[in-house]
Amino acid sequence: MTDPSALQATGLRLDNILIALGSRTLVSIDHHIAPGDVLTVMGPSGSGKSTLLAFIGGFLDPAFSARGHVNCNGADITDAPPQARRAGLLFQDTLLFPHMSVGGNLVFAVPQSVTGRAARRDYAGDALCDVGLDGFFDRDPDTLSGGQKARVALARVLVSDPAFMLLDEPFSKLDAGLRDQIRRLVFERAKARRLPVLLVTHDAADAEAARGALIELAPASADGNGT
């Protein structure tokens, strides 16, 4: 029989996290995201969704106070610098480097453990193939469609060898048909790699597609800030 405590040691554990701005509590959450599962946090603008991601990713604005612990695969990463947390981040904007080729964007994210120019290029090329962009290595990002840019952004996250993924409304700027396609691709690739995923959104369709647990945050008060 599997020990429940052993299961809790894998994945992403959000242990009694409380985030506040001044005297106002924005987020209170205690949840375990198992490998391959998605936790969706929903709420309107200002409810603290992006603030929660910032805390988990290690870049919370010092204007906010926070307590609790973030554990990834049994390791406490609460005080680790952002680059040591191995968080794969996807945002509303793809944030591709315009001065680099599509392949260059990916090579930039390849772990340093992959050495040699040819090996790093092959590693990035394989990631492009995995998201349906074989032959796009030398393309200029400015020549890509919105869906292609979204695929490149996903490939860049996956090629970085993340331990978990943080999704900050990455589908919101895509048209409806494309949104369904990219959403499905992101969740399929994360599940295949057994990555725990935290998705923040205001779109109920995102939560339905994620097929995981759902936490809803209360709207911000009139004098609140959070995002």
Image (cartoon, rainbow, N blue to C red):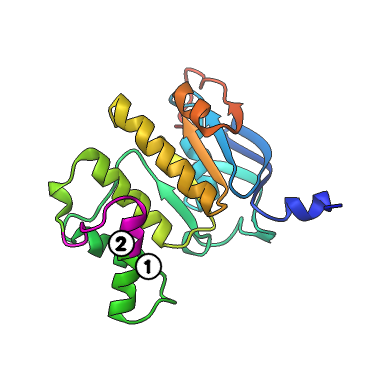
What is the x, y in percent for residue 200? Answer: 49, 34
Q: Which quadrant would residue 120 be assigned to in this image?
A: bottom left
Nearer-the-camera pick, 190 or 141: 190
What is the x, y in percent for residue 220? Answer: 51, 22
Q: Is residue 224 above or below residue 107?
A: above
Q: Residue at x 37, y 55 (%)?
A: 130
What is the x, y in percent for residue 96? Answer: 25, 52
The 10 Å Cα crowd at callout 1, few under 14, some 14 to 19, many 20 or more, is: many
What is the x, y in percent for residue 155? Answer: 35, 54
Furthest residue to the right? Answer: 1
Residue 112 inside the magenta-drawn segment:
no
Residue type for callout 1: Val
Q: Disc 1 and disc 2: Cα gap in Å?
A: 6 Å
Which residue position holds label 2? 106
Q: Residue at x 50, y 24 (%)?
A: 43
Q: Residue at x 52, y 20 (%)?
A: 219
Image label count: 2
Q: Is residue 79 above or below residue 94?
A: below
Give the left or right position of residue 174, taking residue 53 as reference.
Answer: left
Q: Main secondary structure of the magenta part?
A: loop
Q: Residue at x 65, y 36 (%)?
A: 29
Q: What is the magenta range?
A: 126-138
Residue 132 seen in the figure: yes
Residue type for callout 2: Leu
Which residue position holds label 1? 110
